[in-house]
Image (cartoon, rainbow, N blue to C red):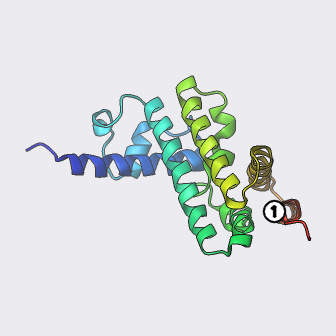
Amino acid sequence: MPYTKKHKMIIRHKILQSASHAFRASGIKAVSVPQIMSGAGLTHGGFYAHFDSKEQLVAEACKSAMEDTVTRLGSVAEQASDEEKLYAVIESYLSAAHRDSSEQGCIMPALAGEIARSSEDIREVFTEEVSCFLSFVSGLAVQDEDKSIALTATMVGSILLARSVNDPELSDKILRACRADLKQRTASPVS
């Protein structure tokens, strides 16, 4: 008896979740299709019933991961007052918990370097998702696009550096300094 559409959607979602976690934790090239399928609790033989290629999976996993990040940060913003929404997002993004959980975190610091050398199809999806993230950030404090780009680049770069150093004190200091700088840059001017 063939599987229902709902069952196929559930399986596809499990594969996407497994892939997005594995890619963020280990990188795209370091993760094989059999590893992804195993992470989803499936055999690798069923992969092509859901995706045409690993490249298609990478593109869709990037989209899924960025949507998860915006959803998670949107929940953080909803819990804050209107004046504090942006800073609550900055605090959450530049936290030790985010730094220490790359497999759960934002895909930009985890994979941007690798995606820059990926196919145009993958880069196109990534570009669309970065644009959505920038719109999300801009909407938090009604900032112009240039300020949202600078803020996002600072957040992403801060996590990338904090994850890259092997000195825990320096890693914490990077996060603290960037949170303080962004709070100062995004503070409302006193009237």
Residue at the limit of the structure toward the front, as seen here: 191
Residue at the limit of the structure toward the left, as seen here: 1
Give 124 or 25, whichever is nearer the viewer. 124
Point 43% across, 44% down: residue: 36
Looking at the image, residue 20 lies above or below residue 77: above
Tell whether 184 sits left or right of 53.
right
Give 39 or 188, whichever is nearer the viewer. 188
Residue at the limit of the structure toward the top, as seen here: 120
- Amino acid under disc 1: Leu
Image quarter for residue 176? bottom right
Tell whether 3 sits left or right of 122.
left
Give 24 or 184, whichever is nearer the viewer. 184
User: The N terminus appears in which quarter of the rendering?
Assistant: top left
Image quarter for residue 57? top left
Point 87% across, 59% down: residue: 185
Point 75% across, 67% down: residue: 87
Label 1: which secondary element? helix
Q: How many neighbours does mark 1 have within 10 angstroms: few (below 14), some (14-19), or many (20 or more)? A: many
The residue labelled by disc 1 is 175
Looking at the image, residue 88 lies above or below residue 19: below
**Count of residue discs:** 1
Residue 137 pos. (x, y %):
68, 54
Point 25% across, 46% down: residue: 8
Tell whether 116 sits left or right of 69.
right
